[in-house]
């Protein structure tokens, strides 16, 4: 798509505050905090309120492509440069459950060496920037009103004395249906149908972000043939039965014993706010209106992906926050605005209860082997 396309220019008027947004947002955050405390009592260890379970913590590098056109050469991507990155693969439940249970997968990317003042005041001088991606193109509960309904349901189940055991079983079937609709999982409605190989998924920002002078969504998809080959590949039943609690972790570890993987990061620029809204994260932006355009390559070399030291570093020391970014890449929309407060509240609680300082790395050598 040429630079002459009618890309929507970013302005502060892009976002529209929703009725009762502050009150609804506070209810969501308060509910999350109560569930966080219940999970702490269950595990005697504070965990993330989403994407609690790590499956791989990897080092890699992100290379911004040369000669990007003006509409893509924005913010972090304005100049060709190669950055070291830390990648955390995870699943989306707010408790630690077997890998066989259906769940969205997450790919959090921490880019190291990013100069410039960052959006969050406490991290303004950090040399890092985060992108948080999920293997689904939209947020099913795309507005804060819908998100509050879901969160209150989760808390009600968690507070029943059985914690997440029942809700995980109920939600898993619903997630299975959503994933099956886009080919990311089986349609069996069985908890033992966890979807395809985790490295072959495409991961999305789901909601919109500012993209310098424009508005965009971001994705990361397989680029090298070896990860394209596992895209959509069903996981062998024998691998699941061998260790139903950790076979996703084993898939990543086995792959990177000897393989190098390449992925491509792309941006989908908004061209029409009516059909590509910012305030409703449940609406998928049509690619026939604006396709994803490549902006960078992510390369991951062979390595040990899940040592005890790496797990502790990623789970207890690091935080990933979509608002930890250059102002040119600020998340947009009401569902993201509530996530700003939710992420910070959860992170503070987790680091406090685990007696671990929050650390933003200066160099990739800080990631343990």
Image: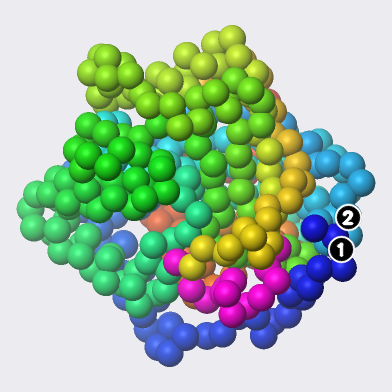
- Residue 69's mark? 2
Residue 279 shown in magenta? yes
In the rendered image, the residue lying farthest to the top is 258
Residue 302: percent from left, percent from top:
62, 15
In the rendered image, the residue lying farthest to the front is 288
Q: Which residue is pictured at 7% across the width and 53% down the height? A: 161
In the rendered image, the residue lying farthest to the bottom is 19
Residue 314: percent from left, percent from top:
49, 35
Residue 146: percent from left, percent from top:
33, 73
Q: Which residue is pictured at 80% across the width and 58% down the height? A: 1
Residue range in magenta is 269-282
Q: Main secondary structure of the magenta part?
A: loop
Residue under label 1: 3
Which of pointers 1 and 2 lies earlier in the amino acid sequence?
1
Quarter the C terminus occupies:
top right
- Depth check: give the residue in front, 79 or 234: 234
Q: Is residue 5 above or below residue 355?
A: below
- Residue 297's mark? none
**Label 1 element class:** loop
């Amino acid at each position: 798509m040429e630079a002459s396309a009618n890309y929507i220019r970013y302005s502060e008027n892009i976002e529209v505050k929703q009725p009762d947004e502050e009150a609804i947002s506070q209810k969501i955050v308060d509910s999350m905090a109560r569930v966080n405390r219940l999970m702490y009592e269950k595990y005697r260890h504070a965990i993330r309120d989403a994407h609690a379970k790590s499956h791989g913590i990897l080092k890699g590098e992100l290379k911004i492509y040369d000669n990007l056109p003006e509409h893509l050469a924005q913010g972090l991507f304005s100049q060709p440069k190669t950055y070291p990155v830390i990648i955390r693969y995870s699943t989306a439940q707010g408790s630690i459950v077997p890998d066989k249970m259906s769940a969205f997968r997450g790919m959090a990317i921490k880019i190291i060496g990013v100069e410039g003042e960052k959006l969050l005041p406490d991290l303004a001088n950090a040399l890092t920037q985060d992108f948080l991606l999920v293997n689904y193109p939209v947020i099913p509960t795309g507005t804060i009103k819908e998100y509050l309904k879901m969160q209150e349901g989760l808390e009600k189940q968690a507070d029943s004395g059985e914690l997440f055991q029942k809700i995980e079983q109920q939600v898993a079937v619903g997630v299975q249906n959503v994933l099956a609709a886009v080919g990311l999982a089986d349609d069996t409605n069985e908890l033992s149908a966890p979807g395809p190989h985790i490295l072959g998924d495409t991961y999305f920002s789901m909601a919109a972000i500012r993209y310098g002078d424009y508005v965009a969504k971001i994705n990361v998809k397989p680029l090298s043939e070896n990860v394209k080959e596992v895209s959509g590949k069903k996981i062998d039943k024998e691998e699941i039965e061998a260790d139903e609690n950790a076979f996703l972790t084993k898939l990543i570890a086995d792959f990177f014993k000897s393989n190098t993987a390449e992925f491509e990061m792309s941006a989908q620029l908004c061209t029409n706010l009516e059909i590509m809204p910012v305030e409703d994260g449940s609406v998928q932006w049509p690619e026939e209106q604006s396709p994803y355009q490549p902006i960078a390559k992510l390369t991951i070399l062979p390595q040990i992906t899940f040592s005890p030291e790496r797990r502790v570093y990623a789970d207890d020391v690091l935080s990933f926050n979509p608002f930890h970014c250059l102002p040119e890449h600020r998340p947009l929309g009401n569902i993201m605005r509530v996530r700003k407060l939710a992420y910070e509240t959860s992170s503070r609680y987790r680091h406090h209860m685990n007696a671990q300082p929050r650390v933003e790395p200066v160099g990739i050598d800080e990631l343990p082997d």
